[in-house]
Image: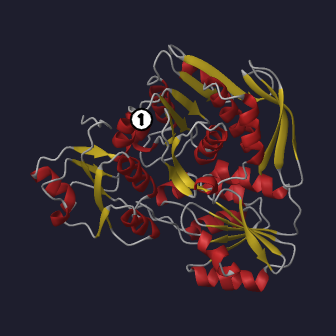
Amino acid sequence: MYQIDFNKPIHVYFCGIGGISMSGLAEILKSRDFAISGSDMKESEITEGLRAKGMTVYIGQRATNVGDDIDLFVYTAAIHEDNPEWTAATDKNIPKLSRAELLGEIMRNFSLPIAISGTHGKTTTTSMISEALMSADLDPTITVGGILPSIGGNIRVGHSDFFVTEACEYTNSFLSFFPKVAIILNIEEDHMDFFKDIDDIRASFTRFSALLPKDGALIINGEIENVDKITEGLDCSVYTYGIGEDYDYCATEVSLDKNGYGSYTLHSPKGEAKVTLKVPGMHNVSNSLAAICCMDVCNVPREQTLAALSGFSGVDRRYQYKGDLAGVTVIDDYAHHPTEIRSTLTTAKATKHKKLWVVFQPHTYTRTKAFLDDFAKVLSVADEVVLADIYAAREKNTIGISSKDLMDKVKALGTDCHYFPTFDEIENFLLENVSPGDLLITMGAGDIVKVGESLLGI
């Protein structure tokens, strides 16, 4: 496989450069004097920003975009061999790397790469760790899957040995990485269009753990079922964390305030401490334990870590307050898996409100079909559910599933549920039915955030 050397800048072409991850990797290489060009299917704020930084961005993917001066061709999972740019790169014998492979190659050039994996919580935990490193003036390079307000985006180019990234298991992409410290937050069924079953997913995480060097460290949620099967035989250091008293890093005396913000007593090999958070939910108590353990492993002063966590108010689209609509509180959340929805709605139920409204946009046909009953069960916790059409993402509907199927399941559980094919219809319905004191959550990994923003006029 082609290897990147930061000391020898080359010309790299990104096929799909407008994606949030691809654009971040392009920025990292550009900061190291690499020549960068690429293409995307449409204009966006990201493509405009890349041009402003001196990169060449084409709109539309054509063979003529791939010039003879390109040394490396980088592509996303959405690019297939019939893509004209792929074909041009092949004809010109240009080396290719997938997005994940490039990320792994970039990690090789840092002595302290940190990779945060898990079915849920990657973006928030990555952000917590990033805030702690920045608070300690350790100047990390960061690539995160959401918008982190303190860095004004999803990428930060630093000049230290620290590199922080999310590590996604989909298509086994994280097996191309080279972490020194790795975190596994949880392991559950997801991405069933790729994985066969939960055992297949666990096997993938087990292989990810085995990537760690002898002087590395694995930080893993001790509440994962049969966690020892994941960690057995590893040469690296292993730390467990969890809520209770049976782990290396434990949270006891946990309480949530009126906003759902957690506080607890931390027990660890480096002593006890009182931890206070500014993000809601028990899931974030767990995420913060992983972040604290990681910072201890990296020898970040504990007081810097706790100060950073106490000031961390979250990432865009993670239980994000959007505004007030004539007395209706509007929240937006990225949750698109039943476990994530359960965590979000548990947090919402603990806050003061009259009716809890959830406007949910299912994400991908395969996920909707695989978890149809689970989605219905967790959504039925709300007082009113409004469903949008399924957000297709990378898929086509070859399995005959629709939001109407989910609506029928939710109704059968006794919860009022409504389906509308357009955002305009959803907005009109909400304007006619929500009341002051209600809590409205737009939820999903697609573009459902637009509903709340449109209602609020932002």
Residue 344 in percent (x, y) is at 72, 54
Provide the secondary structure element on which disc 1 rests.
helix
Residue found at x 59% / y 56%: 372
Query: Foreground residue, 50 or 331?
Result: 50
Q: Quadrant of residue 170?
A: top left
Residue 106 in percent (x, y) is at 38, 38
Residue 221 in view here: no
- Near mark 1 (Cα within 10 A), the count class, few <14, some 14-19 or many ≥20, is many
Left or right: 403 as drawn, with respect to 46: right
Query: Foreground residue, 295 or 389?
Result: 295
Residue 121 in view here: yes
Please name the amino acid that badge 1 sits on.
Answer: Met
Residue found at x 15% / y 53%: 69
Q: Which residue is mark 1?
A: 107
Residue 431 in percent (x, y) is at 74, 84
In the picture, the quarter occupied by the N terminus is: top left
- Please tell me how many numbered marks the rendered image carries: 1
Residue found at x 34% / y 56%: 78
Left or right: 101 as drawn, with respect to 298: left
Left or right: 390 as drawn, with respect to 354: left
Compared to 156, does 17 lie above or below? Answer: below
Give the residue at the far left of this rendering.
91
Left or right: 226 as drawn, with respect to 33: right
